[in-house]
Image (cartoon, helix red, strand yellow):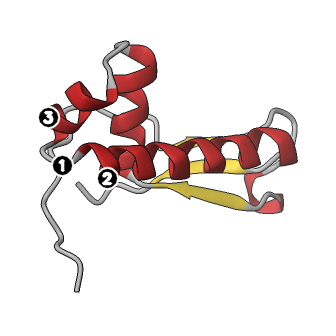
């Protein structure tokens, strides 16, 4: 059974939904991005930290960060390429 560690999330994510322009939200499929996925993207891609630094900052292992980043980037790519909305789950 895998361990579930509480991940440290320090980003203040005010905007919880992003969608393509000109299409009502109710007509779009939604991709749900977890708060830890967004935090990993923020630290890695916006702050420019390395995976080892991101793992330490979030309190998880480097392989876990690698999986989180892969999942987050796949979800973001799916939403951008296929015109889906992105909603950030506020479960932190």
Q: Is residue 15 left or right of residue 8?
A: right
Image mark for residue 46: none
Q: Do callouts 2 and 1 mark residues in contact (Cβ within 8 Å)?
A: yes
Residue at 41% from the left image edge and 44% from the top image edge: 66
| Residue 9 horizontal/vertical position (percent) | 20, 41
Q: Nearer the viewer, residue 37 or 52?
A: 52
Q: Secondary structure at mark 2?
A: helix
Q: Which residue is mark 3?
A: 56
Residue at 34% from the left image edge and 44% from the top image edge: 65
Q: Which residue is mark 1?
A: 60
Mark 3 vs 2, N-terminal side = 3
| Residue 44 horizontal/vertical position (percent) | 39, 24
Image mark for residue 64: 2
Q: Nearer the viewer, residue 14 or 66?
A: 66
Q: Is residue 47 left or right of residue 17?
A: left
Q: How packed is label 2: few (under 14 Cα within 10 Å), some, or many (20 or more)?
A: few
């Amino acid at each position: 059974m895998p361990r579930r560690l509480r991940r440290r999330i320090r980003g203040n994510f005010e905007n919880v939904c992003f969608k393509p322009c000109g299409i009502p939200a109710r007509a779009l499929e939604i991709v749900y991005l977890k708060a830890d996925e967004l935090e990993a993207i923020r630290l890695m891609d916006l702050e420019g930290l390395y995976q080892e630094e991101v793992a330490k900052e979030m309190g998880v292992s480097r392989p876990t960060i690698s999986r989180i980043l892969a999942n987050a980037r796949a979800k973001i790519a799916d939403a951008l390429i296929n015109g889906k909305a992105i909603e950030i789950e506020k479960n932190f």
